[in-house]
Image (spheres, rainbow, N blue to C red):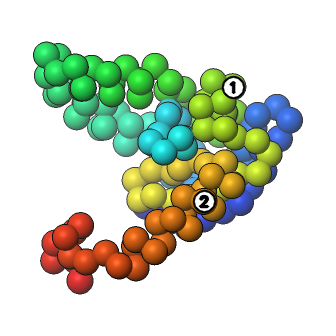
Amino acid sequence: MFLGTYEPRLDAKGRLILPAKFRDQLADGLVMTRGQERCLYVFPAAEFEQMYNELRRAPLSSKASRDYIRVMLSGASNDTPDKQGRIVIPQNLRAYAGLDRELAVIGAGARVEIWNATAWSDYLSAQEEIFSETGDEVVPGLF
């Protein structure tokens, strides 16, 4: 499980050094793709395969399903971290997420999310108030 928030920097070649706590789970390969809210999703390769198998079950007759699958898969890129734990973020994904040098890399359970640091800060500021007021209507029985 991926947890926590880290603030690494993107180097001039578009490489990111993965947080040390995430490296073992991504060492066998990963898939990076467009995420929602203009971030990037990074899945362990096996987790992405499971997610893809779920996506395949969506009916071809559903335009919303086709659109979602096209956007998610057309932006996907696979990679394996090097010995220093670095991965290359392709230019098209950097542009999609508005990534520059300052990043926020967060653990989101089964995936990692990569955000522009300012976009993450803005998002988190807006969501923290909502989070503090959220009742059991989001996850019934959680608390």
Question: Which of the numbered marks, if any, corresponds to residue 122?
Answer: 2
Element under disc 1: helix
Q: Is residue 40 above or below residue 123?
A: above
Tell whether 124 sits left or right of 131. Answer: right
Q: In the visual, does 52 lie left or right of 125? A: left
Q: CA distance from mark 2 to mark 1?
A: 23 Å
Indicate which disc, 2 or 1, sits on the residue closer to the N terminus: 1
Picture layout, residue 28 above or below residue 128: above
The x and y percentages for residue 6 are 66, 62
- Badge 2 element: helix
Residue at 59%, 31% in the rendered image: 96
Q: Can you give x and y, in whole percent of width and height, for residue 49 in the image?
A: 34, 33
Tell me the residue at 61%/38% (across/down). 97
Q: Amino acid at mark 1?
A: Gln
Can residue 49 be seen?
A: yes
Res. 21 in view: no
Give the answer, above or below, for where 69 lies relative to 51.
above
Judging depth in this view, the residue of 137 and 102 nearest the camera is 137
Q: Position of residue 1 (x, y in %)?
A: 43, 61
Residue lying farthest to the top in this orientation = 61
Residue at mark 1: 91
**Image quarter of the C terminus:** bottom left
- Quadrant of the rendered image containing residue 94: top right
Under mark 2, the amino acid is: Asp
Quarter of the view holding residue 125: bottom right
User: How many C-alpha atoms fall within 10 Å of the one at disc 2: few (<14), some, or many (≥20)?
Assistant: few
